[in-house]
Image (cartoon, rainbow, N blue to C red):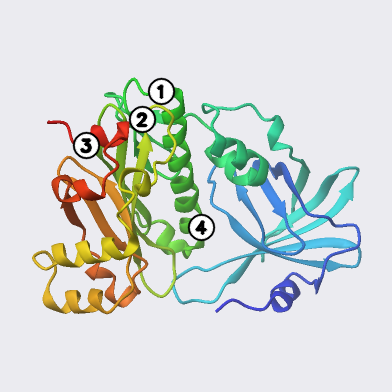
Amino acid sequence: MLLSAGAQAASCGAAPGLPDWARGGTYRGTLGSLPVALSLDPKGESLYFYEGRSLDLLLEAGHAGNQLVLQESVRRTLGSDPVVTGCFTLMPSGTSLKGTWQAPGAQGPQEVVLTPLDATRLPLRLPLSPGLSVLRRDHPLTFLKLNRPWVTAADGRSVREPLSGVRYPRVPGASAALNAALQDRQLRHAADALDCRATLPEDAQRDPQEGYNANVQVTLLNARLLSLREDVDYYCGGAHPDNWTQGVILDRATGRAVPLTTLFPKLSAARQNTLYLNAARGAVDAECLTVLRETTLDFTAHLSAQGLNLTPSGLPHVVAACAETVTLPYAALRGDANLSSAYVRTLYVK
């Protein structure tokens, strides 16, 4: 269990609350000889990271007189209380912050110099995309971590984000708009993966089996549509591991999401539920089928050559294993389909 903010701040010799001059902001600079970036949030969670490592360290803000004190603490092992690993003591110097950082028991402090960061002025190391622009504007620390060259597979069919290790499919010869949409989905996964690993205790951070693992597969690619299935399993230090599945249907030219109702306007939530339960009889064991029948189901959908695939989403953790995917053949959905749609015609090619 985390210590209270007041108790944590007292460990660095500070009282709760910020000095009058302190304002929220994002900073970049050095701690000793190492490059760091820091976000100060007077009303929320402050954090920083070493740019060579790129995992966030949480900070509790306090003050000692007119000095800003930021206490760094980590968990060494799962279930252990946080321990204080460093104390920032900072004062304003023009628009910058200057001061020291000292680890408990260290012989002396290290100098800290931080200057305000305007991430919108940083050059892009990735192709411009809507998600990257939002990240640069609203989440500059995450932008700093992910705005670097990614690694494209030799066959051009996937890209790996190097810090998180998240891989995501690409379509050789795809439009710039589709590539941007795929990059933005990968950005969200990569950011979530880094956030997840940062919340793990130190010993688990070194275990490649812990954290956030995304497996993304192209399930349909035709002249008009691209569909993918995203499967994520993760453990971020909470009560138990968890997982989820997300279906994705995109316009191959524009990269925009194609709602299921555009393809199958008569496929209401109630009809999805009925068709799913009918199809699940042969795919799901009796106990799970009972659970599914007694639950108000929501679904995520992806397309494949065989048909429309529905996967229950949002089931309670104790019955999450019952979220089996079933395939509804396109022939069985002809009456629900918008047969005048150019998208749908690609699914009913004779």
The mark nearer the N terminus, 3 or 4, is 4
* Mark 1 crowdedness (10 Å alpha carbons): few <14, some 14-19, many ≥20: few
- Amino acid type, callout 3: Leu
The mark nearer the N terminus, 2 or 1, is 1
Number of numbered discs visible in the structure rendering: 4
Residue contact at pointers 4 and 1, CB within 8 angstroms = no
Q: CA distance from mark 4 to mark 2?
A: 35 Å
Q: The residue tagged with tag 1: helix, strand or loop? A: loop
Q: Name the residue carrying label 2.
A: 252
User: Foreground mark, 1 or 3?
Assistant: 3
Q: Residue at x 57, y 72 (%)?
A: 82
Q: Name the residue carrying label 4.
A: 198
Q: Nearer the viewer, residue 70 or 120?
A: 120
- Amino acid type, callout 4: Ala
Q: Nearer the viewer, residue 158 or 180?
A: 180
Q: Residue at x 47, y 62 (%)?
A: 202
- Amino acid type, callout 1: Ser
Q: Residue 51, image x and y in percent?
A: 59, 42
The image quadrant where one finds the C terminus is top left
* Mark 3 crowdedness (10 Å alpha carbons): few <14, some 14-19, many ≥20: many
Q: Name the residue carrying label 1.
A: 175
* Mark 2 crowdedness (10 Å alpha carbons): few <14, some 14-19, many ≥20: many
Q: The residue tagged with tag 2: helix, strand or loop? A: loop
The mark nearer the N terminus, 1 or 3, is 1
Q: Residue 24, image x and y in percent?
A: 78, 54
Q: Residue 296, image x and y in percent?
A: 33, 73
Q: Which mark is residue 347?
A: 3
Residue contact at pointers 2 and 1, CB within 8 angstroms = yes
Q: Residue 286, image x and y in percent?
A: 12, 77
